[in-house]
Amino acid sequence: MFKTPPRSPLDEDLRARLDARESHALRRQLRPISSGIGPRIVVDGRSILQFCSNDYLGITSHPAVIRAAETALARYGTGAGSARLVVGTSSPHCELEEALAQLKQTEAALALSSGYHANTGVLPALTGPEDMIFSDALNHASIIDGCRLSHAATKIYRHNDVEHLATLLSATGTIRRRVIVTESVFAMDGDLAPLSDLANVAKQYDALLVVDEAHATGVFGSHGGGLVQELELGAHVDVQIGTLSKAIGALGGYVAGSQTLIDTLINEARTFIYTTALPPSVAASATAAIQVITQEPERREQLWQNTRFLRKALDAAGYHINPGNSPILPVMIGDAAQTVALSNALFTHGVLVSAIRPPTVPTGTARLRVTPMATHTENDLEQAVDAFIAAGHDTDYL
Ligand SMILES: *Cc1c(COP(=O)(O)O)cnc(C)c1O
């Protein structure tokens, strides 16, 4: 048995910070689940209907994807053994990169350890103090950190405001390189970037366009290639970034673009060079997932159908959902404490939807981020709507 150690000054300080978070309904806690990710999960021995994963297509439990991982696990073992440039590149990594380049219709692609690594690797590799980055105000934390690590001057343009972006671009003097960076589907708001307009402005001001397709890959595009593919803008986007952890259902990140870009990243992206390669089994499952995404478009269709149903039903129930055209349905609440109360009430009614609070989103815009899966049944969706109505009444929100 361990004895409880006496409280140190550090613990006292940290405790005060945690208490301050608690009093503002901003304290976060882990919730272990004892099942795989699916429409239903097991929490504390209870079966719960969940609407907050990014496994949009139900890929994490797809038999062919699991089989591919098992086969690679038996053949290659549990870990890659080293970084990619040392002895960590195996056939599954190369096959994955070929599949990614094909999916994104680019010359080449590179797999990294996560989407976070991709954003924090690419921006510093492409820019330095003599360059300028133009970043959307609602870009993901990994893009913000990539901007910081690059040491480039960073200008923040108002969310999806192309005119504001053009104003900022026109006010720059002699700069070596201008880079515009945006998400294509905004992770917490579910709206889409005006990619065609961004491509035009990029061309007008001779700027590079970097697009993070984390939530678009597998969901948009005729073959699931993303929003860039759907809008046929591949020729106008210099760098496509994404993750293997959302619709692809595994772990890892990727960069897709020209062969020269990829060769440069292999030589210069610190988050690629100085970290251990993905386990080969993870790479193999991602490759199998890409195959499913390409060959089973009915999953995408079902996801969209479920999305339309939920948006309409929650709206009719009296909730305000941020306008947008993606499977991310942000039910806007505003106050963090109210959002937590609704999330807890939903849980009591057997439905898990996490409360998204500052600093993930701006203060006063806390929300319940609802993400349907292709594998939710009509019954699941109806149960969720009933739970939303009951939770709204329980907490005097509705
Ligand atoms: C999730 C996400 C990432 C990070 O991807 P991981 O693979 O989970 O590290 C990057 N960008 C955006 C827009 C995301 O939503």
Image (spheres, grey):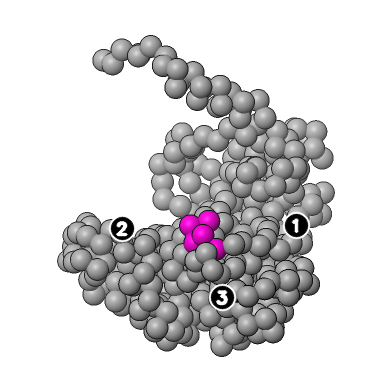
- Neighbor class of circle 2 (other Cα within 10 Å; few <14, some 14-19, many 20+) is some
Q: Is residue 3 magenta?
A: no
Instruction: Residue 149: say if magenta.
Output: yes
For the N terminus, give its image quadrant. top left
Which residue lies under the disc numbered 1? 322
The residue identified by callout 3 is 177
Residue position marked by numbered label 2 in the rendering: 275
Given residues 127 and 159, the one toward you in this image is: 127
Give residue 69's position: percent from left, percent from top.
29, 64
Residue 395 visible here: yes
The magenta span reads: 148-152
Along the line of sight, the residue nearer the viewer: 331 or 129: 129
Please name the amino acid that badge 1 sits on. Answer: Asn
- Residue found at x 82% / y 40%: 398
Q: Counting residues from the N terminus, which is met first, the one under dot 1 or under dot 3?
A: 3
Q: What residue type is labelled 2?
A: Thr
**Disc 1 from disc 3: Cα separation:** 35 Å
Question: Residue sitting at 75 percent across and 42 percent down?
Answer: 364
Say left or right for 208 vs 281: right
User: Residue 283's quadrant in the figure?
Assistant: bottom left
Q: How far apart are marks 2 and 1 (CA)?
A: 38 Å
